[in-house]
Amino acid sequence: MKKIVISTGGGDAPGLNAVIYAVVHASYRRGWEVYGSRSGYKGLLDMDELHRLDVSDVEDIYSTGGTILGSTNKGDPFAMPVENLAGEMKVVDVSDKILDNFRRMGFDCHIAIGGDGSLEIARKFSEKGMPVIGVPKTIDNDLEATDRTFGFDTAVATATEALDKLHSTAKSHDRVMVVEVMGRDSGWIALYSGISGGADAILIPELPFDMKKVCEKIMDNALHEKDYAIVVAAEGAVAAGGKVISKGMAELGRSEVLLGGIGEWVAAEIRERTGKDTRSLVLGHLQRGGSPTTFDRLLAMRFGAAAVRLVEEGRFGHMVALVSPNMSSVPLEDAVKSRKKVDLNSDKVFTAREIGICLGD
Ligand code: F6P
């Protein structure tokens, strides 16, 4: 009999519930117990936030977005913002308390589902002696050690559908529409949705862009009687010689700046340089919502089942990974070493260029 605690940390992503579903079912078949820790590690700090998960609790959750456990991206136990008696916010290390509670509850393993931030926390706990298995999640698809993270396919599908819809309105008004998509410092969502959604220009963080080239492409559309254009800008895209546009640190205890604003900036430049009627919109958290695609559900369930197999084999300190076509695993320290960037010499980038999409260079 084993006792597992599972948590979801960082930004949510479609497919989280499918992982939980698979972990609970695969554990149940082995006669093991699963507990869910609410809001990342909160359940291991405060026992009221720790709940036993039975098969009946997860019956039909695999098709739903979000996470039944809740999530947070300011819940780093090694630097947690807490309010002191004077009402001031302080950042404190509560990791020892969490490890104590984990041991007191008699858990054999913690399955941590998260992106690079949450997996780095999992790695630190593993170093402290907690048996941990990581499961890679993020719509950004920016973890080097796995071919894919779940959530990405759904985010791309949402962004592509939005581009399809924007085409008709852009065409009716002879407008330029600039769409800002998520992805942090990687251009995966922008590139995949931009190609699939017929964008005229795609701006990604991996390739600093030149507004002159973007505007030339927009004006060149007239050569084939097209008076509108769609530009996809990844939130982390940067103009050559410019800086990443961000909203600064959103909250205490958050380790990364909140990106945003590049779409509006690009739209203003296009308006000024071309005189064309231009609008911008930010797809934002729409990309994180909704039911996971079939691809993401299946990937999430495969990750969940593979995580339970790793627990059985006692291969702690590892993250499950997709090394196509198989499930594999990598040590957590390798999983968080570097972020996966779009390879400018890959066939998807060649495809974009060959079908006439401007990448701003
Ligand atoms: O990492 C996932 C992600 O959605 C990024 O693409 C985005 O930059 C960030 O999270 C947004 O964070 P928040 O949900 O805190 O606004």
Image (cartoon, rainbow, N blue to C red):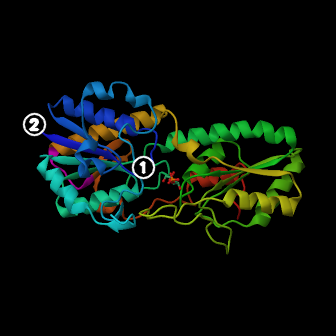
Which secondary structure is most common in the magenta stretch? loop
Residue at the far front in the pictured view = 86
Residue occupying the far bottom of the picture:
241
Picture coordinates of residue 339 (x, y %)?
44, 61
User: Mark 2 and mark 1: span between their CA atoms?
Assistant: 33 Å
- Residue under the image location 39 percent in, 47 percent down: 71
**Is residue 203 toward the left or the right of residue 77 in the image?**
right
Residue 79 against residue 142 in the figure, above or below: below
Q: Quadrant of residue 145?
A: bottom left
Quadrant for the N terminus in the image: top left
Q: Which amino acid is tagged 2?
A: Met
Q: What type is the residue that disc 1 sits on? A: Asp
Q: Which residue matches tag 2?
A: 1
Give left or right: position of 80 versus 52: right
Q: Residue 320, how many percent across, how many down? A: 30, 48
**Magenta highlight range:** 313-318
Circle 1 crowding by C-alpha within 10 Å: few under 14, some 14–19, many from 20: some
Q: Is residue 315 magenta?
A: yes
- Image position of 243 with respect to 312: above or below: below
Q: What residue do we see at 28% from left, 66% from top?
A: 93
How many numbered badges does the structure rendering display? 2
Q: Position of residue 222 (x, y in %)?
A: 89, 49
The residue shown at (81%, 59%) is: 270
The residue tagged 1 is: 147
Residue 35 position (above or below residue 138): above
* Residue nearest the observer in this picture, 201 or 347: 201
Q: Secondary structure at mark 2?
A: loop
